[in-house]
Image (spheres, rainbow, N blue to C red):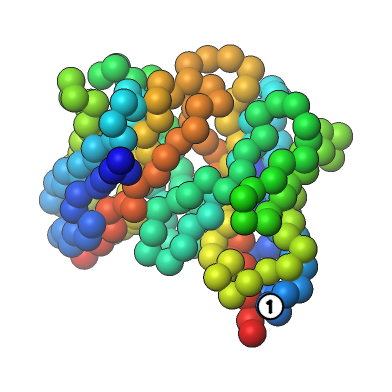
Amino acid sequence: AQSVTQLDSQVPVFEEAPVELRCNYSSSVSVYLFWYVQYPNQGLQLLLKYLSGSTLVKSINGFEAEFNKSQTSFHLRKPSVHISDTAEYFCAVSDASGGATNKLIFGTGTLLAVQP
Amino acid sequence: DAGVTQSPTHLIKTRGQQVTLRCSPISGHKSVSWYQQVLGQGPQFIFQYYEKEERGRGNFPDRFSARQFPNYSSELNVNALLLGDSALYLCASSRWGGRGTEAFFGQGTRLTVV
C-alpha cells in the first residue's frame, strides 16, 4: 500500500518570492509521482509527473519537482510565484510495479496563498 | 476537443435517498475512474472501469456502485445517502487506464446531503 504526506496544509508567500511545497510518500513498491493543482470550484489539473528518467521534472509555467528516492520525497518548487498561482496543490502516487490500473493515492493538499 | 464532462454540477439530496452521477470521458478514452473529495482532504479512489469491466475498487461501502456503458460513459450510484457522503465527486478519464497513463479530471459534481 502507498501513502502520501503533505505536512503543510497552507503556505503563505509574497508575490515574486520563491516557494517549496513538500511531499513525502511511503510505498513498498516502485511508484510514479504526480503534482496536481486545483483552482477554486474546479477539478484537478496535472501540473507535472515523474515516471522515469531524469529525476528533475518541469512544468510549462515555471514549477519543478525533484524525485528523491532515498528520502522518498517529491517536493514542488517555484523560484518566483504570481498571484495567479494561488490554488490547492495535491501530491499523488500510483503503483509502478505492474498491474493494469492508474489509480492515484493523494495527499491532503497544500493551499498556496500568494499575497501581493 | 471537449474535456471530461460531469453532470449535474451541483446536487442536494436528503439522507436516505439515492443519487446517480454521470461522466462522459474524453473522446478516445476507454477508462473512467471515480474519486470522492471531502472538504479539506485529498481525493479518494472509489472505482475504475475499463472497457465496461471493473478494474479497481477503493475502500467504500457497498452503497456505492458504478458502471460503464458501451460508449465509455459512466455512472456512479450511491444508495441510502448519509450526511458523510457530502463531497465533490470527481470523474477522471484516461486512454487505457494502465499504470502511468495520465488521468484527466472533470470539474466534479458537488453533492450535499441534508
In the rendered view, would you say B8 is above or below B72? Answer: below
Give the camera-side residue of B109 and B28.
B28
Label 1 sits on a secondary structure element that is loop
Decide if residue B61 is in sight here: no
In the rendered view, would you say B32 is above or below B41? Answer: above
- Position of residue B100 in the picture relative to residue B67 (left or right): right
Q: Residue at x 68, y 77 (%)?
A: A15
Task: Give residue B25's quadrant in the image.
Answer: top left
Q: Position of residue A64 (x, y in %)?
A: 72, 50
Decide if residue A115 is in sight here: yes
Q: Quadrant of the C terminus of chain A?
A: bottom right
Q: Residue at x 54, y 62 (%)?
A: A88
The amino acid at mark 1 is Glu
Residue positioned most to the bottom: A116
Q: Residue at x 38, y 38 (%)?
A: B92
In the rendered view, would you say B112 is above or below B57? Answer: below
Q: What residue does disc 1 label?
A: A15
Q: Position of residue A62 (x, y in %)?
A: 68, 56
- Position of residue B45 in the picture relative to residue A30 (left or right): left
Give the camera-side residue of B58 and B68.
B68
- Position of residue B46 in the picture relative to residue A32 (left or right): left
Q: Quadrant of the N terminus of chain A?
A: top right
Q: Residue at x 21, y 65 (%)?
A: B114
Task: Give residue B49's quadrant in the image.
Answer: top left
Q: Residues within 10 Å of mark 1 (few under 14, many from 20)?
A: some
Q: Chain of mark 1?
A: A
Q: Position of residue B50 (x, y in %)?
A: 33, 20
Give the camera-side residue of B84 and B7.
B7
Q: Position of residue A49 (x, y in %)?
A: 62, 38
